[in-house]
Amino acid sequence: MKFFIDTANLAAIEEANSLGVLDGVTTNPSLMAKEGISGKENIISHYKKICEIVDGDISAEVLSTTFEEMIKEGEELAALHPNIVVKIPMIKDGVKAIKYFSQKGIRTNCTLIFSPGQALLAAKAGASYVSPFLGRLDDISTDGLHLIEEIRLIFDNYGYETEILAASIRHSMHIINCAKIGADVVTCPLQPILSLLNHPLTDNGLAQFIKDSQKMI
Ligand code: E4P
């Protein structure tokens, strides 16, 4: 399973990358705005900086919502670096844009997926990734993990090569459950990745080993 970090914060991206387990980055307009990135030049230079840090797929989201504008914006983003994946919202014009990009060999990530039907449409249009938002479903008392299971079943039934990029991950159990279901990728902030490190028996065991190692010196 691939690990992407879901942030536009360069320090967090660098820290995750230094672990040696990072396969890519996802961003969205809210994450970019949180870092104070605004204006076309700054947006472009920020994506370039992310591409310099991480050698893996970098999702860059279009800000427009009509077919023509998404095509223009997506082509500009894709031209920035071979690792850029154009992130397109799950709307009617978005599906058309995904089809257009797939015919041109430009990779896409269809975002804001909340139902199996949306994932199926995006896969049929040729999306490279679909991003089901499991945490936001959990937030409204709906089983986000069940959506990942349904999409896995549908894609396997028909051999779709579209990768399931489980998004809106809130904690490490989401990561583990996505791995059990067979999501291709999880994207989350740095903390859920780091919390995979933790177990109290590891801490206790290491403390004892350090203590006993003093006897050996
Ligand atoms: C996915 O690509 C989105 O950027 C993201 O995972 C949304 O997560 P949130 O629900 O924590 O905002």
Image (cartoon, rainbow, N blue to C red):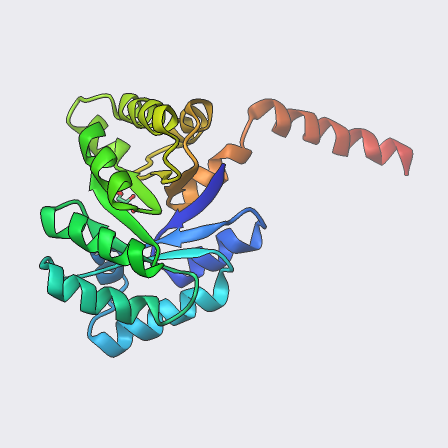
Q: Is residue 139 visible?
A: yes
90 up-or-down from 10: above or below: above
Say left or right for 158 vs 63: right
Where is the C terminus found, in terms of image quarters? top right
User: Could you say which quadrant of the image residue 77 lies in?
Assistant: bottom left
70 is higher (above) or lower (below) than 180: below
- Nearest to the observer: residue 118 or residue 36: 118
Q: Quadrant of residue 197?
A: top right
Whether residue 115 is visible, yes or no, is no
- In the rendered image, residue 117, in percent from the top left (x then y), is placed at 19, 30
Give how far across and how far down residue 64 sits, in percent: 13, 61
* Residue found at x 30% / y 56%: 103
Q: Nearer the viewer, residue 77 or 16?
A: 77
Q: Residue at x 12, y 46 (%)?
A: 91
In this rendered view, identify the residue nearer to me: 88 or 159.
Answer: 159
Residue 85: quarter of image:
bottom left
Total numbered circles: 0
Reply above or below: 180 against 75. Answer: above
Residue 111 position, x and y percent, is 24, 45
Q: Quadrant of ligand 1?
A: top left
